[in-house]
Image (spheres, coloured by chain):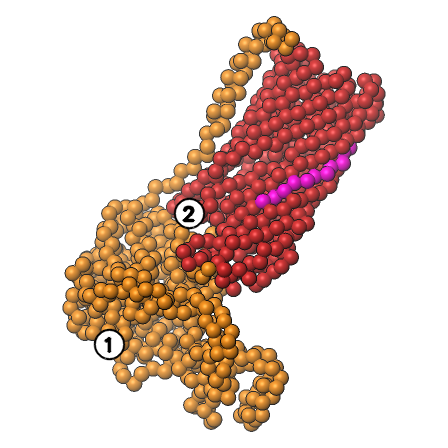
Chain colours: A orange, B red
């Protein structure tokens, strides 16, 4: 019946056929998927064929308290060279370590530790895997010159120091000795083996960091890394390095020095991290009667050593900082911070913080002035890392400076995770793109790893 | 442990989830259906028009929704991604009409799917911490009654019972020793109630006017399940738990008109006011919370919209007609809140279709809708996820009606 009707209505059939053709044509059109075009990346004349990164541990890819191969692979210079390779071949040489163990000491990983009270918790512990460091001591300068010239621990002042590699090795930083062609050469002279067409310069953090991470104690030995570098020495070292990089007319960027007091190494242990019950508070009030120190139920400020105080100790002030290296067992079970003052080397006092901030500001002012003078853009890493401390969101991931959970800082509380280094790389790219009017693609930060949690 | 904002941010249901495909002739005519009454799909488009149906009609149709979205990172265009192909099949079933041919009372039942669809990105894409995949399905059941006051005015109303389910997956930014992300899966059944009211005015054979109002339907997930895959060392921070959420499906006020200048040609126009601002905030409340797993309150800040639609129906012969239409459907999503789970943008819709009556009581309907969202460079501020999006969708549809009178 239906079929009969169908054939009777041949006219309709023809019309229908036409409309079906029309509709299927529409369908073909419609099934075309969206086709958004990305702009072609442009370097706007920048020459990346010999990119050289000069700096310290942050440039080397140091993380988790050590230098290891995958950390180097996830250094910001390697990330940048990957983006730069869009504009032509780059042979970016990195003085890779043989393995993942960490050199010279094992890297930190998250693991379980049991404290003096028998409480087990997750915290950074030395990596206990197989040492794959064989050959780490071998000098590999013949493979150089290295494009990643990041040398963990190096200061601006060291660039003019003959024999730096030997001295650094004796202080536990054998990195220059691995890659320098002459252990008695000044780092500046080793750097001259490179002829960059483009550079990044992030030097100067260690000119204050050593002072900070040793609790502001300083050293009577002149030019010791635990002292803040003198401005004149910093300026001479930094300027000479900058001049070497610029000597062939290379373009590049310079970074300033982050305010180290906002990193997890100094912000994790709270000044008022002493919880007391009523009876302990009463006992301490009795013990310290007349000293001006008071204790109450709840969180209290730790008792710290202070030689300038009449009784050699006082309570820490709310804006003073305690180092991440404070032995927690001594606090929990040996009376540190209460009846025994926390030694000064674990504390940055108001004055010590002031010394750090003053030096950092002076060094950064000089870096900014030099950048302007030489027409090289400045990446304000100091400002950027401060934004991280208040928390930044990137593609659904919140980064902040909380130890372990913040995602940007590695387990040593000073250096960055691969994701943290990627954030840094994007800041650099943004500055390059803005200043040189290039359109270099950003890095997918979340392609890299943050903190690794155990199973 | 772990950031408290892990689950903040995303999860949207909105304009992209509203699918205006509840009747084939109406789809083919740009989505117009409030003014001119054609068939039993009036139960959805304007219950006031059901009393115009001379007898009982059964109506069934199915749509094949094939959406495709592309994302390009901004500002440097370093990354591009496309959604995985998916086919969604919204459907409509209506039975209804006047109980007696010359009576005034009509009753009917509609079963239809006005909100549905979803999006599926590659698991490892750049936006995985905002969304990997999401799907929302809903079925509305609407018993309806309609009464003809006279030759000119008829009224109608239906009670809506809506049931549905939601499922979403996203990566969690906690990684194991191998660098593998954690993941979260949230799923649950939702239901809600509402009303669909309409008035239909037919001053003459060549003029029809309709007004309809569909109330907001609050779809409540009373006890969804949230399950997490994280490294063991974080397991206590992410307990599997139940959650509660409420998704308001917006109220819609429609005004439509149809004219028939010559017997073969019907022209329709319509405007829909959609109360999207009900979708101000999306809250997820978990039964168990931890410092890492907090209740979330994501700002959506949707704004109300007005869509405009135009259609034409040309009767080629008594048994065969062709339709075409166009619509402009602006996005309720304001700049700054365009998220990759619903990369919504203003849409331009073109459509066409046919109806063919091979035998006296049976009509076969075919339609195709071609939805093209404008390219939108957008941000999702809560996640700081930025990019340019474009969505295209093609919806071929087929259906039939059978008249019992």
Question: Which residue is denoted by mark 2 in the rendering?
Answer: B75
As helix, strand or loop, the secondary structure at mark 1 comes to helix
Looking at the magenta stretch, what is its main secondary structure?
A: strand
Image location (x, y in percent) of residue A282 = 60, 88
Instruction: Give the residue drawn at x 76%, y 32%.
Output: B143
As helix, strand or loop, the secondary structure at mark 2 comes to loop
- Quadrant position of residue B367: top right
Residue A368 in sight in this render: no
Q: Name the subunit of mark 1.
A: A
CA neighbours of label 2 inside 10 A, class few (<14), some (14 to 19), many (20+): some
Residue B165 drawn in magenta: yes
Question: Which residue is denoted by mark 1 in the rendering?
Answer: A170
* Residue B262 appears left or right of A138: right
Image location (x, y in percent) of residue B328 = 58, 32
Q: Which residues are magenta?
A: B157-167
Image location (x, y in percent) of residue B327 = 59, 30
């Amino acid at each position: 019946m239906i079929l009969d009707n169908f054939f009777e209505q041949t006219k309709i059939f023809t019309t229908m056929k036409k409309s079906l053709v029309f509709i299927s044509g529409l369908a073909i059109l419609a099934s075309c998927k969206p086709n958004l075009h990305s702009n072609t990346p442009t370097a706007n004349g920048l020459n990346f064929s010999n990119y050289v990164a000069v700096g310290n541990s942050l440039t080397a890819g140091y993380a988790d308290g050590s230098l290891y191969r995958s950390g180097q692979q996830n250094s910001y210079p390697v990330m940048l060279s990957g983006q730069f390779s869009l504009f032509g071949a780059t042979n970016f040489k990195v003085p890779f370590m043989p393995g993942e163990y960490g050199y010279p000491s094992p890297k930190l990983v998250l693991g379980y530790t049991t404290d003096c009270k028998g409480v087990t918790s997750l915290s950074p512990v030395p990596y206990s895997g197989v040492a794959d460091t064989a050959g780490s001591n071998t000098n590999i300068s013949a493979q150089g010159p290295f494009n990643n010239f990041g040398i963990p621990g190096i200061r601006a002042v060291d660039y003019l120091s003959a024999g730096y590699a030997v001295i650094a090795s004796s202080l536990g930083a054998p990195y220059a000795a691995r890659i320098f062609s002459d252990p008695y050469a000044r780092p500046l002279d080793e750097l001259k083996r490179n002829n960059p067409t483009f550079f990044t310069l992030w030097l100067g953090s260690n000119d204050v960091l050593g002072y900070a991470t040793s609790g502001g104690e300083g050293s009577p030995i002149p030019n010791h890394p635990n002292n803040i570098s003198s401005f004149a020495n910093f300026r001479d070292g930094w300027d000479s390095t900058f001049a070497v990089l610029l000597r062939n007319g290379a373009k590049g960027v310079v970074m300033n020095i982050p305010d180290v007091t906002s990193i997890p190494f100094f912000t994790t242990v709270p000044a008022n991290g002493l919880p007391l019950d009523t009876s302990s508070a009463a006992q301490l009030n009795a013990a310290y009667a007349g000293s001006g120190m008071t204790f109450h139920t709840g969180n209290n400020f730790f008792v710290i050593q202070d030689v300038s105080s009449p009784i050699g100790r006082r309570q820490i002030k709310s804006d003073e900082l305690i180092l991440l290296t404070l032995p927690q067992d001594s606090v929990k079970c040996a009376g540190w911070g209460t009846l025994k003052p926390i030694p000064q080397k674990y504390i940055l006092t108001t004055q010590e913080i002031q010394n750090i901030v003053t030096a950092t500001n002076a060094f950064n002012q000089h870096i900014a002035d030099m950048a302007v003078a030489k027409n090289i853009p400045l990446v304000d890493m100091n400002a950027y890392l401060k934004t991280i401390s208040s928390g930044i969101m990137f593609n659904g991931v919140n980064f902040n400076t909380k130890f372990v959970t913040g995602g940007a800082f590695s387990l040593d509380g000073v250096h960055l995770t691969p994701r943290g280094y990627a954030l840094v790389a994007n800041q650099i790219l943004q500055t390059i793109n803005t200043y040189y009017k290039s359109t270099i693609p950003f890095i997918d930060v979340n392609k890299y790893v943050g903190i690794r949690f155990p199973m | 442990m772990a950031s408290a904002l892990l689950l903040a941010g995303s999860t949207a249901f909105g304009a992209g989830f509203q699918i205006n495909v509840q009747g084939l002739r109406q789809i083919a005519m740009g989505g117009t259906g409030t003014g001119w009454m054609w068939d039993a799909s009036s139960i959805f488009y304007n219950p006031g028009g059901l009393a115009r149906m001379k007898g009982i009609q059964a109506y069934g149709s199915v749509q094949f929704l094939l959406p495709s979205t592309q994302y390009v990172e901004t500002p440097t265009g370093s990354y591009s991604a496309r959604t995985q192909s998916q086919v969604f099949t919204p459907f409509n079933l209506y039975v209804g009409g006047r109980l007696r041919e010359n009576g005034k009372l009509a009753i009917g039942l509609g079963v239809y799917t006005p909100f549905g669809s979803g999006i599926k990105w590659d698991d490892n894409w750049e936006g995985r911490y905002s969304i990997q995949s999401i799907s929302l399905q809903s079925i509305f059941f609407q018993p309806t009654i309609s009464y003809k006051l006279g030759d000119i005015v008829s009224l109608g109303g239906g009670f809506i019972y809506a049931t549905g389910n939601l499922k979403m997956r996203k990566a969690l930014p906690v990684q194991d020793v191998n660098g593998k992300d954690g993941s979260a899966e949230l799923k649950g059944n939702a239901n809600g109630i509402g009303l669909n009211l309409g008035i239909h005015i037919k001053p003459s054979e060549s003029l029809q006017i309709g007004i309809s109002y569909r109330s907001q339907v609050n779809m409540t997930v009373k006890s969804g399940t949230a399950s997490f895959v994280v490294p063991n060392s974080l397991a206590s921070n992410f307990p599997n738990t139940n959650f509660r959420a409420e998704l308001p499906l917006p109220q819609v006020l429609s005004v439509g008109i149809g004219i028939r200048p010559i017997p073969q040609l019907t022209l329709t126009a319509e405007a829909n006011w959609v109360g999207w601002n009900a979708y101000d905030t999306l809250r997820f409340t978990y039964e168990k919370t931890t410092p890492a797993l907090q209740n979330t309150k994501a700002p959506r800040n949707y704004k109300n919209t007005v869509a405009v639609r135009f259609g034409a129906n040309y009767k080629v012969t008594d048994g065969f007609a062709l339709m075409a239409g166009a619509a402009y459907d602006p996005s309720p999503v304001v700049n700054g809140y365009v998220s990759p789970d619903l990369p919504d943008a203003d849409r331009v819709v073109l459509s066409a279709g046919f109806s063919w009556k091979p035998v006296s009581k049976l009509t076969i309907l075919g339609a195709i809708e071609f939805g093209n969202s404008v390219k939108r460079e957008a941000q999702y501020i809560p996640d700081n996820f930025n990019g340019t999006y474009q969505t295209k969708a093609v919806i071929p549809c087929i259906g039939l009606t059978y008249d019992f009178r």
